Image: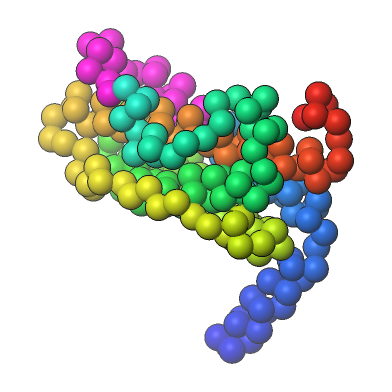
Amino acid sequence: SSRGSGTLVVYLVAMCRAVPVNDLLDRASQRSDKMHSLSTLLTQEMDSHFPPYGRMQMPRPADCHTSALQTPNDKEQALQVSESDLMSLARSLLQAWVDPLAVLSTSAITLPHPSKSSISSKIQELQEHSKSLGDGLDILSGKMGPSAQAISFLPYTGGTDLGQDRVTILNKFNFLLSCLRRDSHKIDSFLKVLRCRAAKLQPELC
C-alpha cells in the first residue's frame, strides 16, 4: 500500500540520519566516483565517432552553465575551503545538472551516433547516481549546519533542443558531456576532501 511504502521511506531516512557522518561521506564518495567515471566513459565513447571539424566548433569550458560558480581549482585550494562551503559547492554543482542531464537523456535516444544505446543507458545510470547522491548530500548537509545547506542556483538556459543537423547535435551533446565531466570531477574531489577531513587524516594524505 502507498501508506506502507511511505512509512518505509520515513524509516529509511531515519536510519540514514542515524548513520555516522564518516559512513555517509564514504557512500557519497563512492557515488561521486561512479558519476565521474561514467562521465569519462561517455566522453571517450563520443570521441570514438566525433567528426574532427566538429571539435573546432566546440564552445570553451568557460561557456559551461556552471562556470559562474567560484570553485577551488585543485586539491590544495580545496583544503583551504571550509567544510560547509565545500558541501555547499558540491550540492550546487549537483543541483545544476538535474535539467541538463534530462536533456542529455532525451537527446541520447535519437543521437546520430553508432553507440547511442550504450550512451543512453550510461546517462540513465548517471541520473540515478545523481539523484541518490543528492539525497545523501541533503542528509549530510543537514548534519553540517545552515551554510552547508545553502545552494547557489545555476540555471541551465541551453534549451531542450540540441539542433537539427548532425554536427550541431553531436557538438552540443559533446560540449554538455565535457562540462559534466569537469563538474563531476569537482564534486568528487570536494567530497573526497570532506571524507578525508572527517577521518582526521593529515592534509598531505588527502
Question: Which quadrant does the C terminus fall into?
Answer: top right
Magenta stretch, main secondary structure class: helix
Q: Which residues are magenta?
A: 38-59
Q: Residue at 42% across / 46% down in the picture?
A: 97
Residue nearer the viewer, 86 or 50: 86
Q: Quadrant of residue 191?
A: top right
Residue nearer the viewer, 6 or 147: 147
Q: Is residue 74 above or below residue 163?
A: above
Q: Position of residue 102 (x, y in %)?
A: 36, 50
Q: Residue at 44% across / 39% down in the picture?
A: 69
Q: Is residue 159 above or below residue 139?
A: above
Q: Position of residue 151 (x, y in %)?
A: 49, 55
Left or right relative to 4: residue 109: left
Residue nearer the viewer, 86 or 189: 86
Question: Which quadrant does the N terminus fall into?
Answer: bottom right
Q: Is residue 11 above or below residue 57?
A: below
Q: Is residue 41 magenta?
A: yes
Left or right relative to 21: residue 8: left
| Residue 118 shows up from this direction | no
| Residue 47 shows up from this direction | yes
Q: Residue at 64% across / 76% down in the picture?
A: 9
Q: How is the image coloured?
A: rainbow
Q: Position of residue 14 (x, y in %)?
A: 73, 74
Q: Position of residue 203 (x, y in %)?
A: 80, 29
Q: Quadrant of residue 193?
A: top right
Q: Residue furthest left?
A: 164
Q: Residue at 56% across / 55% down in the picture?
A: 134
Left or right relative to 188: residue 54: left
Q: How many marks?
A: 0
